[in-house]
Image (spheres, helix red, strand yellow):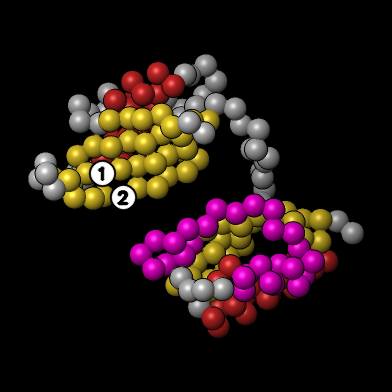
Amino acid sequence: MSNNKLIVSVFAEDRPNLIKDISDQVLAHDGNWLESSLSRLCGQFAGIVHIDIDDEKRDDLLDAFAELADQGITIAEQSAEGVIDDSDTVNVVEIMVEANDRPGIIGEITRALGAANVNVDSLDTGCESASMAGYTLFRAHMMLAMPEGMDEEELEELIGDVSDDIMISVLEN
């Protein structure tokens, strides 16, 4: 028996027991839920799941996932080629970015990060009213994988150079 790394994306309208319904199928097919990144936004639920499954049971699990479509759960197989263990990534930093909201701000920030070869591992964004100031405040909570040799001060400068109103806080992780 040979095991297979299976990567699936999940999308559904959020509801109680959604994860349970998916994980029940993994367990019923003797799979092992290795890791996931799942999130709820605007009443929708989406994410990615990494599963270890016996080659002989893989197709049956995918068939069971397809049957979950009747419950409004869409699960799609993704390519597992090139799956690497990134748990030992070293130069990872957690930051909070705040600025006046405007169209294109996330593009400005990620363009600067990409130009410096900084990878976005996770990103959560939102906007809220800064009522005392009379404008909308943009916030981004980010986990960033910095290239070897880059330090936190360089990262702060890189993002700060995007515009004068950006504030960056490096968080302890």
Q: Which mark is residue 126?
A: 2
Residue at point 72% right, 54% down? 5
Please tell me how crowded label 2 is: few (under 14), some (14-19), or many (20+) other residues with Cα within 10 Å: few
* Viewer can see residue 17: yes
Q: Which mark is residue 160?
A: none
Whether residue 54 is situated above or below residue 147 in the rendered picture = below
Q: Residue at x 23, y 50 (%)?
A: 128
Dot 2 amino acid type: Gly
Q: Is residue 28 above or below residue 133?
A: below
Q: Residue at x 46, y 65 (%)?
A: 45
Dots 2 and 1: beta carbons under 8 Å?
yes
Is 56 positioned to the left or the right of 71 in the image? right
Question: How far separated are the C-alphas under marks 2 and 1?
Answer: 6 Å
Q: Indicate yes or no whether the magenta region holds residue 37.
A: yes
Residue furthest right in the image: 1
Q: Is residue 114 visible?
A: no
Query: Which secondary structure, mark 1?
Result: strand
Task: Classify residue 9 by image quadrant.
Answer: bottom right
**On-image quarter of the N terminus:** bottom right
Magenta residue check for 124: no
Residue on which disc 1 sits: 138
Which residue is more in the foreground, 129 or 154? 129
Residue 56 place in picture, x, y as percent: 83, 66
Image coordinates for residue 155, horizontal then vertical, percent = 40, 23
Q: Earlier in the sequence, mark 2 or mark 1?
A: 2
Residue at 35% x, 64% y: name it.
Answer: 42
Magenta extent: 20-46
Q: Given the current orientation, which residue lies at the most extreme front position?
A: 132
